[in-house]
Amino acid sequence: MFFMSMLIFLICNLMMMLANIFSMKTFKDREKNSPFECGFDPKNSARLPFSLQFFLIAIIFLIFDVEITLILPLISTMKISSFLSFSILFNFFVLILLLGLYHEWNKGAVNWKFELNS
């Protein structure tokens, strides 16, 4: 059993070494294997400042994503509850969304300026 496992281990290592030797990788493909795939240069410091607008867009996405997960159970409760209770829950849900959007707008997170090159 030990001999078989060692033989399998050696065959796997030999195949990986052969694939690495005969692969068509060049020095130019080094960028593909770098840990950063988001546009940052991997040779510089990872603590470079970036635009805060990307962070705010991600937060807004998370807020609306969580809100969608909250609205899905409302659909199933519509079958077992009355229309009045459903409308109260839905209005409360929309109120939370609007308050969140107003807060983001008040903080300047959705104040984007678009420039058209004409």
Image (tube, rainbow, N blue to C red):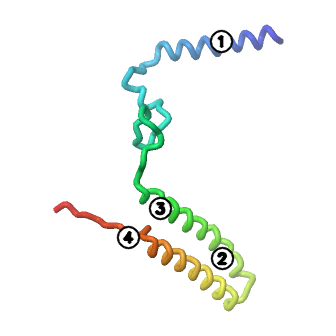
Disc 1 target residue:
11
Mark 2 vs mark 4, foreground winner is 4
Which residue occupies 61% across, 79% down? 93
Q: Secondary structure at mark 4?
A: loop
Tell me the CA gap for discs 2 and 4. Answer: 33 Å
Please provide percent x and percent y for residue 106.
45, 75
Q: Look at mark 3 in the image and give the residue it sits on.
A: 56
The amino acid type found where label 2 is placed reads Ile
Q: CA distance from mark 1 to mark 4?
A: 60 Å
Q: Amino acid at mark 1?
A: Ile
Closer to the N terminus: mark 3 or mark 1? 1
Residue of label 2: 75
Q: Quarter holding the C terminus?
A: bottom left
Give the residue type at disc 3: Leu
Pick out the residue farthest to the left: 118
Q: CA distance from mark 3 to mark 2?
A: 29 Å
Relative image position of residue 58 (x, y in whole percent):
50, 59
From the viewer's side, name the closer residue of 95 and 78. Answer: 95
Counting residues from the N terminus, which is met first, the one under dot 3 or under dot 4? 3
Amino acid under disc 4: Asn
Label 4: which residue?
111
CA gap, disc 2 and disc 1: 56 Å
Cα distance in 3D space between marks 3 and 4: 11 Å
Packing grade of label 1 (10 A; few <14, some 14-19, many >=20) is few
The residue mark sitting in front, 3 or 2, is 3
- The residue furthest right is 1
Mark 3 touching mark 2, by CB under 8 A?
Answer: no
